[in-house]
Image (tube, helix red, strand yellow):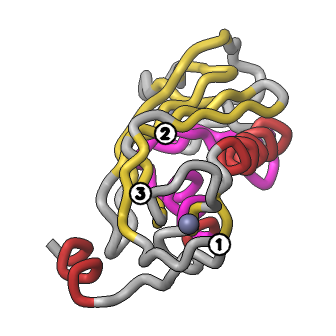
Amino acid sequence: MNWLKRFRSQPSGQCEICGNEYQLELLPLVRGRRGQVEVFFQDLPVLSCGLPGHPRRYVLPDFGVLLIDVVFWKKFVPLGRPGVWALVKCLNCDKNLTKVDEHFGEVAGVLEIKDVPPFGIRIQGPVTTCPRCQTRQLKATKAVGTDVSGSFVEAFKNIQLEP
Ligand SMILES: [Zn+2]
Ligand SMILES: [Zn+2]
């Protein structure tokens, strides 16, 4: 596995406070909430010196950008997308879902980012089912999408995770 080789072969830096070498740590449950959305990460990979209260670091320098990319565009977790004419379109068949009913629910998936151990995500918020192809998905209008990325920020704040 690429990520395992990477973490064994490359030193990942040192904690600025205690000077300990950073190690890969998988956090079993990390959660964050913003607006209509709550997010839960399972086994989130971070770099950590192992001491409580010390900041943790992104597992890759551009982890935040990569996370947004895999959540919104790679279909590991089902999210509708904004369209040119539609507020939100089905991620599978492009049907306009703007006027389709939504209810509070949850979508889940496993995120794969190159050189990083795969980790789980659950997103709670407005969920809808496409009437054409039956794909259940987060009704990610622009406002809901902003809440999704905002909930990531909150989740990272909760564990003192910094770039
Ligand atoms: Zn430390
Ligand atoms: Zn569809």
Within 8 Å of ligand 1, the CB of disc 1? yes
Could you say whether the residue bearing mark 1 is in a helix, strand or loop?
Answer: loop
Which span of residues is magenta-colored? 65-93
Residue 148 drawn at (x, y percent) = 70, 41
Location of residue 147 (image quadrant): top right
Amino acid carrying label 1: it is Ile
Which of 140 and 109 lies nearest the eye of the viewer? Answer: 109
Q: Which mark is residue 41?
A: 2
Percent x, y of residue 36:
79, 24
Single out the residue that lies furthest toward the left: 1
At mark 2, the secondary structure is: strand
Q: Quadrant of the N terminus?
A: bottom left
Quadrant for residue 8, please give it. bottom left
Neighbours of disc 3 within 10 Å: few (<14), some (14-19), many (20+): many
Q: CA distance from mark 2 to mark 3?
A: 10 Å
Left or right of 56, for residue 25 = left
Whole-percent x, y for residue 62 in the image: 59, 77
Q: Which residue is mark 1?
A: 17
